Image (cartoon, grey):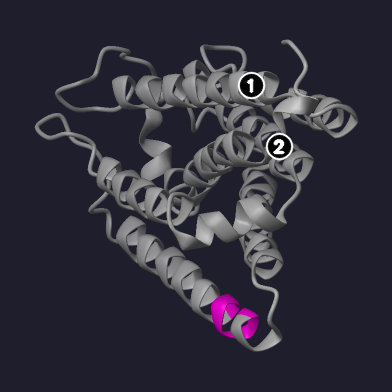
């Protein structure tokens, strides 16, 4: 696939991620006045963050080097802190109260698109095969299984299934992140592959750790919080 089409596909996935966030916020705020303010605030924060990370990527300050940890890790850390604030705060409480359990699970299907982008980058020799489903990245299984798990939960609520699937998804996501760090130039590098994982420090792929990975993690955490709070014990089925 021509690289320009890969870039366009990835950018489309980012925009879909933004839409998913705004839809969740819209569902969480029932009052029209407060909903408008909430949407405007969240949209401003998201697009401001995307702009900031774009500038950082364009300046080259996020590119890894052998003498320091990958600077892009700071981008991921900042967003994950924001994810925890949202998930475990009032916003997260509103989302888990208003968004259906199947919807919080099914949206993770976007990860299939992400994995196809990573595969295309490797095919174009600008990204490492290590981080694809042909290497050590099994995240596509989470995306492919999301519709099935959502359907099962819609048919019969099952707290054990929801929690187990989400924890598995987080562990797989964590494994991908670890492999990305270990394939990046720096003191932690263990996989000396060519090309390395520096692609995620460039535009637009800086938005992978900057938005899409945190979006996937937020979905897992919200789904677990919802399962612990809202699925009645009387409707539980054994896993």
* Identity of the residue drawn at 30% across and 60% down: 56
Instruction: Say whether disc 1 or disc 2 marks the residue closer to the N-terminus.
Output: 2
Q: Is residue 33 left or right of residue 221?
A: right
Q: Which residue is mark 2?
A: 105
Foreground of the two, 238 or 74:
238
Q: Secondary structure at mark 1?
A: helix
* Identity of the residue drawn at 36% across and 36% down: 198
Verify whether residue 228 appears in magenta.
no
- Residue 31 is situated, as x and y percent measured from the top left of the image, at 68, 81
- Tell me the distance, in whole angstroms, between the alpha carbons under discs 1 and 2: 9 Å
Verify whether residue 37 appears in magenta.
yes
Is the magenta region chiefly helix, strand or loop? helix
Mark 1: give few (<14), some (14-19) or many (20+) Cα within 10 Å: many
* Identity of the residue drawn at 32% across and 13% down: 191
Residue found farthest to the bottom: 33
Quadrant of image for the N terminus: top right
- Residue 212 is situated, as x and y percent measured from the top left of the image, at 53, 46
Quadrant of image for the C terminus: top right
Kindly check if marks 1 and 2 are in contact, taking CB atoms under 8 A apart as contact.
yes
Q: Which residue is mark 1?
A: 165
> Is residue 210 depicted above or below 164 in this figure?
below
């Amino acid at each position: 696939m021509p690289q320009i089409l890969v870039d366009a596909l990835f950018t489309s996935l980012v925009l879909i991620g933004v839409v998913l966030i705004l839809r969740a916020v819209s569902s969480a705020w029932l009052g029209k006045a407060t909903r408008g303010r909430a949407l405007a605030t969240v949209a401003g924060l998201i697009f401001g963050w995307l702009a900031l990370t774009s500038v950082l990527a364009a300046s080259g300050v996020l590119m890894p080097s052998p003498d320091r940890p990958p600077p892009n890790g700071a981008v991921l850390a900042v967003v994950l802190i924001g994810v925890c604030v949202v998930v475990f705060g009032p916003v997260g409480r509103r989302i888990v109260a208003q968004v259906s359990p199947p919807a919080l699970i099914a949206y993770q299907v976007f990860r299939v698109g992400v994995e196809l982008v990573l595969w295309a980058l490797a095919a174009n020799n600008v990204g490492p095969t290590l981080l694809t489903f042909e290497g050590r990245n099994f995240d596509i299984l989470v995306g492919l299984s999301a519709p099935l798990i959502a359907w099962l939960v819609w048919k019969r609520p099952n707290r054990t299934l929801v929690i187990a699937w989400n924890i598995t998804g987080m562990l797989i996501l964590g494994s991908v992140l670890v492999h990305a760090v270990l394939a990046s130039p720096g003191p932690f590098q263990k996989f000396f592959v060519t090309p390395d994982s520096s692609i995620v420090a460039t535009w637009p792929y800086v938005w992978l750790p900057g938005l899409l990975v945190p979006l996937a993690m937020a979905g897992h955490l919200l789904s677990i919080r919802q399962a612990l709070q809202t699925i009645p014990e009387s409707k539980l089925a054994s896993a």
